[in-house]
Image: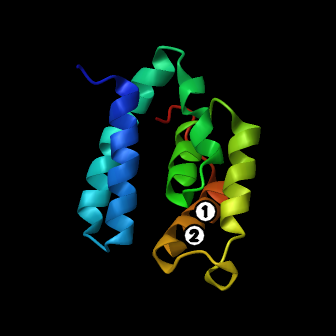
């Protein structure tokens, strides 16, 4: 069975999460970021972005952060809310230590924003 663009995005989300959990090299994390963006762009260009919406409610913080970034220009209010929630998390409140950079990334995205042509 041929993979769909959504399958590639999901695979990249999973790989990025595994890389964080297992403290693997950042270059691998970035490699899957590039792949995720390529396929997310195709999904958005084909007006299928709603297929990514369920990931904004995922229990997985990494998935939520990544998809909030991908859909930021499609659903800015919803994505800003997700990013705000993530930015307010802390290790003291139960956020796994390997997600600390995710929290910082969410905070920076709220401060800086995302380019209009992303992904």
| Farthest front residue in view | 1
- The residue depicted at 54 percent of the width and 43 percent of the height is 67
Q: Where is the N terminus found, in terms of image quarters?
A: top left
Q: Secondary structure at mark 1?
A: helix
In the picture, measured across the screen, residue 18 lies left or right of residue 53, that is left
Q: Which residue is mark 1?
A: 108
Residue 45: % across, % down: 47, 17
Q: CA distance from mark 1 to mark 2?
A: 6 Å
Above or below, comparing residue 95 to residue 54 in the picture = below
Query: Which residue does the image show at 26% across and 70% down from the upper left?
Result: 24
Please state if 119 lies on the left or on the right of 87 as rendered: left
| Residue 49 drawn at (x, y percent) | 55, 25
Which picture quadrant has residue 91? bottom right
Nearest to the observer: residue 112 or residue 106: 106
Q: Is residue 6 left or right of residue 84?
A: left
Total marks shown come to 2
Residue 26 percent location from the top left of the image: 29, 66
In this view, 10 is above or below 81? above
Quarter location, residue 11: top left
Residue found at the far top of this picture: 46
SS type, badge 2: helix
| Mark in front: 1 vs 2 | 2
Task: State which quadrant residue 105 falls in.
Answer: bottom right
Location of residue 48 with respect to 102 vertically, above or below: above
Picture coordinates of residue 20, whole percent (x, y): 38, 67
Dot 2: within a 10 Å radius of its alpha carbon, few (fewer than 14), some, or many (20 or more) residues?
Answer: some
Residue pointed to by mark 2: 104
Q: Look at the numbered discs 1 and 2 and tell me whether their residues touch, using CB distance below 8 Å.
A: yes
98 relative position to 65: left or right: left
Q: Residue at x 72, y 48 (%)?
A: 80
Name which residue lies at 37% across and 50% down: 14
Q: Residues within 10 Å of mark 1 (few under 14, many from 20)?
A: some
């Amino acid at each position: 069975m041929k993979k769909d663009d959504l399958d590639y995005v999901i695979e990249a989300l999973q790989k990025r999460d595994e890389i964080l959990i297992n403290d693997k090299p950042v270059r691998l994390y970035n490699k899957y970021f590039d792949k995720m963006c390529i396929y997310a762009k195709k999904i958005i260009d084909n007006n299928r972005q709603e297929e990514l919406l369920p990931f904004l409610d995922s229990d997985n913080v990494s998935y939520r952060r990544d998809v909030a970034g991908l859909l930021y220009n499609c659903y800015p209010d919803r994505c800003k809310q997700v990013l705000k929630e993530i930015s307010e998390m802390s290790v003291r409140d139960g956020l796994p230590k390997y997600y600390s950079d995710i929290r910082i990334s969410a905070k920076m995205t709220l401060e800086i924003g995302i380019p209009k042509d992303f992904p």
